[in-house]
Image (cartoon, coloured by chain):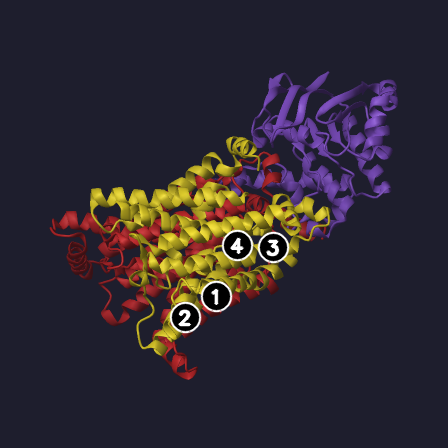
Chain colours: A red, B yellow, C purple
Amino acid sequence: MVELITLILFFFALYVIVSLSLNLEFGYGGIPNFGKALSVLTGALVVGGILNRLLIWYFGIEGDFISASSLAAYRMTEIVSQNPLIGLGIFLFCVTMAVVAGAIAGALSILPSAKLKGDYLGVTLLAISEVVYLILFYNTEIVGGYYGVSVPDILAFVPGEYRVYAYTVLALICALLVYLFLEKLLNSPYGRILRGHRENEDLIKAFGRDVMKLRIKTMALGSAIAAIAGVVFVFYSSSVVVNAFNRVEWTFYPFLIVLLGGKGNNKGVVLGAFIFVLLKMLIDFYKFDIKYLLHLPFEAVWLQYIVFGILALLILCYKPEGILKEEPIYTPPIKSRLKTNP
Amino acid sequence: MIDVLIGAMVWSNLLVLLALGLTMTYITTGVPNFAQASFAIVGSYIALTLLRLIGLNPYLSIPVTFILGGILGLSTYYIALKPLIKRKASIEMLMIATLAWDLILFGIIGAYSEVLSAITKKTETLFVFTSLDFNIYGIPGRLIVSSLLVLLTILGLYLLLYKTKFGIALRASMENPSLAEAMGINVENTRLFSWFLSGALACMAGSVLPYLQEIVPQTGYFIVVSIFAASIVGGLYHIVGALVGGYIIGISESLFTYILSILLGPGVLVYSKVISLLMMIATVLLHPRGITGTEMWRRVERWLNL
Amino acid sequence: MILLETKNLCKSFDGVKALDNVSIEVERNKLTLVMGPNGSGKSTLINAISGFIKVDSGKVIFEDRDITNREPHEIYNYGIVRTFQNPEPLKSMTVLENVLIGRKHSGEEITNALFTSRWMKEEEELVERAFKILEFLKLDHRWDHPSRALSGGQMKLLEIGRALITDPKLIIMDEPIAGVAPGLAHDIFSHVVELKNKGISFLIVEHRLDIVLKYVDNLYVMFNGSVIAHGKGRDEIEKVLNDPKVIEVYIGD
């Protein structure tokens, strides 16, 4: 039971980070970022592709990338188990790199379509994300592809049986920081102009805003945040396996969460993430029981896809505003008006 | 080399069929259908089922896949999109709906492949038809059949759109939906027609696809970028765009992979998607309306007297 | 005093001339009206001036500066704002937010947004101004309502409010009273006249001549992409309206 709760909390934290970043782009800004998975993958790439190569070079390990990575990860894990500061240092280093790489990836991926309307924007973002995913998946030399590569255990100093809890706490801290950051950032004229862009881009163009710049900056920020989730995820699983960063899990599910919780409402998105992860983990955890109980002649994961697809359609149709509705942005001067002239 | 050319032509023919549906539904409904590739895989599994259960040659099952595909297309419109369009949902919401529909189809395909495996006692999650293909004077059946399908589709569409009353109304409402609606043409009919045809053509292409490559439930995720690239490069606002784009993308992908495989060795299939992506990005940057949206194309059209 | 002029603007769509050598002048502190039947090129003209479409040839001059084919957001910086044909408020945002968003704000920069102190003073002043504008337009009692709850006429007023907060030199309006009841339409124009007297110039495209004509200072009539008649001042406007060419165009409509 504790195991299940920890699992739920960990993935809750990850999905909070990614869905909040999507809420910034899509919920507030109206940018249909169907390439969300790309930014999470960027975080994984930073750890599996860059950190591993640095370690291989540092330790002077020879041989092919995948086996050299295993050895490097093993050696580094040994060091970290003696020296917690190095582990945390590596983590912070990777987060910083992921934020930079995520920002670059986000800005570049929207560049081709930054001037166009929503449909072209969504298609181009999805296509770029899919192609990068396919290349990283089939080419095992970049970051292990479908074989996967090991990465060091940055919390190796925590005794084995508590390590999962430590990772969960780490993930929850990251999620909390992201939440506080975005709440502060979006309850401002920036949040207001994003919503304006979502409602009518021509109008804000006519009122002096450079829509292209606004989109590029917002995508850079959103992707930088989501890349953090990628870093946390691969350290937790102590490996990078590219399949784990597919479009369903890291593009579609975040959209489902934002719609479920309430687009444009960060609290709603946190709530949405909780409900979603609870459902998903219960299905994952009890998949054999479900299969047995319902006499399914197939794996429960297919059922999960069908259920979440139907859920998304139902929300779109019957509750497009989500569980918690969007609220106006009340900056302090507006808030004081609420008292004087209600 | 000749095999490469044959493969390129077959792939292009299939892309044309897939892109045609995507372009048509985009014109009539205004939403890019992310489930288009999954339509094809549904077609592949229908063909596989008929082959396994009643021993029907996949080529002969094409009429069945055509009709079932049409029903799939219609249900996509009725279930996933129409309720939202009625509620005036934004284009972004409609796109999410097609993504959700794609996921549902993916789940059904995956579940079904395991069910079928249980029935036939074979692994059906991965299959090909290549060994079943026939051969006339060294020309493989897949090339003959896929070319015939494209020809028949073009001929059928031409006769329908230019020679019947329904077709003229259809064309009017595809070229300018709001104007057509003002003129009293029933736009809903054109939508139904386009979704039926979109599903039908895609499933038909799907029943030929296993002659060309291995099919797994995830295959849709692999080919979706090529379909979009074909429609966008050709021009999303013109049916002929799918034809032009399908051949450009299909041939470029195949030849690019061939050249790359000479240079780098096998296992480079995935890079074919890079060329589609680059061509799509170039189009989006330089001329989002694609080749058939250019001034030059209009001159060609006038010259051809279309 | 000429504030804005266009010189021989030309624009074709698919070989059809939407603008054919269009030259107009907008005088300072005046209300200039462009009229013409549907499809005569009026909307294309203001889209061209405000940067939403790029012209094939010709020039747009504003305060002696060439602003031809600039991006819309650059044109805003010169002091030109526009409203849209269908009142398009930011529907899920409040009436107040709709006005506030008109003006560029240093708090919109991601780097500033995080530090409330960097934009607080600006925000206070802006909210203060916005309330004054809403009072002027008699919308202040609804400031915290979502703007989709407004009537069509109130939405048009809100559009004017959003334009006002930018301190514009020129407001371009695309059919400001289309679909508005006559009483409210006169109300809108009395606001326009008041603003004109405060030093703002107007360029307006409108169909409903019965209401709008008595407020107009200068008039241009367009047909098939070109200007077929124009007049400055009351007398000339009378003449233009009795011009057989103009009458024919309107009867033909």
Sequence-earlier tag: 4 or 3? 4
Q: Circle 4 — which element?
A: helix
Q: Confirm whether circles 4 and 2 share one chain.
A: yes
> Looking at numbered disc 2 in the image, what kind of residue is underneath it?
Leu
For the C terminus of chain B, give its image quadrant.
top right
Residue at which label 4 appears: B95
- The alpha-carbon separation of the residues under discs 4 and 1 comes to 29 Å
Please tell me whether mark 2 sits on a helix, a strand or a loop: helix
Residue A187, compared with residue A318, is above or below; it is above
Closest to the observer, B104 or B22? B22
**What amino acid is at disc 1?**
Val
Q: Secondary structure at mark 1?
A: helix
Q: Nearer the viewer, mark 3 or mark 2?
A: 2
| Residue appearing at x 40%, y 63% in the figure | B44
| Disc 3: CA contacts within 10 A as few (<14), some (14-19) or many (>=20) | many
| Secondary structure beneath label 3 | helix
Instruction: Name the residue nearer the viewer: B104 or B27.
Output: B27
- Which chain letter matches label 2? B
Residue designated by label 3: B191
Whether labels 4 and 1 belong to a single chain: the reply is yes
> Mark 2 sits on what residue?
B50
Label 1 vs label 3: CA separation?
22 Å
Identify the residue position indicated by label 1 in the image. B64
Residue at 54% over, 34% down: B304
Q: Are marks 4 and 3 in contact (CB under 8 Å)?
A: no
- Front residue of this view, candidates B177 and B103: B177
Disc 3 residue type (three-letter): Arg
Residue B67 place in picture, x, y as percent? 52, 64
Q: Is residue C179 visible?
A: yes
